[in-house]
Amino acid sequence: MFGVSSRTVLAALREIFEHRMGVTPEEVGRYKELLSSSEGGTVVAEYKEFTIDAVQKAFLKSHDDLARQMFNDYLKEARFYMEQKAKFVRSRTDLVRDELTGRPKVPNVKFLREVEQHVPISESEADNYRAEMLYARNITYDTYSPLARAVEKKLLSDSKDMLKTVLAIHKSKDEETKKRANDLFSELTGPGGFCNICAKEIIEKADEFLNE
């Protein structure tokens, strides 16, 4: 994979064709385009995708507590939605009500849909899906991957600014952010991961790519 001197390697590869025999000018132009352009299918595009993917995976692992909490919040909100709906349909008076207004509490449907769209579940399928979650057994973050992956995608979407802050750690004085950054670095350099120097470059490039 791309290591400590990936930028140097790409630069060297772009220059090497000037010293190769039997390569036409058209071929040289094509090869340089593959090594320079950020369009899909090029080396640079692949490097960009690889870098962001590596950092996002490390970010999710270092924010495992937030993902699990969101997973549980979804199940709790889906249960509340289905119970309130059943009571309302049956015209029951024991709806959960707001202590201040006395009005029936409204489930956070916006949050439910933001998670469900990553499953993906359409709006017309939502009630059936929430009912399945309500009556299914042993659904946890570790045992039900479709919902877990949807939660992770929402977390990444919601945390884009947080991820940028964590990556740009030298700009932050917040202790919690520093801890998150250290956790992310530890994930990148863990077993089977990158060396410290490679991880540092991955973080720097991901910060650059996400701020484009």
Image (cartoon, helix red, strand yellow):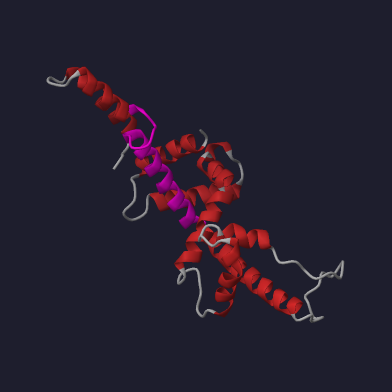
At x 64%, y 60%, the residue is: 111
x and y percentages locating residue 179 in the rendered image: 54, 51
Magenta residues: mostly which secondary structure?
helix
Measured from the top left, where is residue 106 in percent x and y? 75, 66
Q: Is residue 69 visible?
A: no
Relative image position of residue 70 (x, y in whole percent): 58, 63
Left or right side of 63 for 95: right
Q: Nearer the viewer, residue 144 or 211?
A: 144
Please tell me which residue is depicted at 59% across the width and 48% down the height of the picture. Answer: 175
Q: Which of 76 and 134 lies nearest the eye of the viewer?
A: 134
Q: On the picture, is 57 further left or further right than 95? A: left
Single out the residue that lies furthest toward the right.
Answer: 101
Where 79 falls versus 210 (above or below)? Answer: below
- Where is residue 177 drawn, in percent x and y? 57, 47
Which residue extends farthest front? 124
User: Where is the N terminus found, in terms of image quarters?
Assistant: top left
Task: Name the side, left or right, on which 35 lies relative to 208.
Answer: left
- Asked if 197 appears above or below 192 in the picture, the reply is above
Query: Viewer-proximal residue, 90 or 118?
Result: 90
Q: Quadrant of residue 32?
A: top left
Residues rendered magenta in the picture: 36-63
Residue located 71% across and 66% down the image: 107
On whether residue 15 falls in the magenta region, the answer is no
Q: Is residue 65 above or below residue 20?
A: below
Height in image: 84 above or below 193?
below
Give the residue displayed 54% in from the left and 65% down from the top. Answer: 68
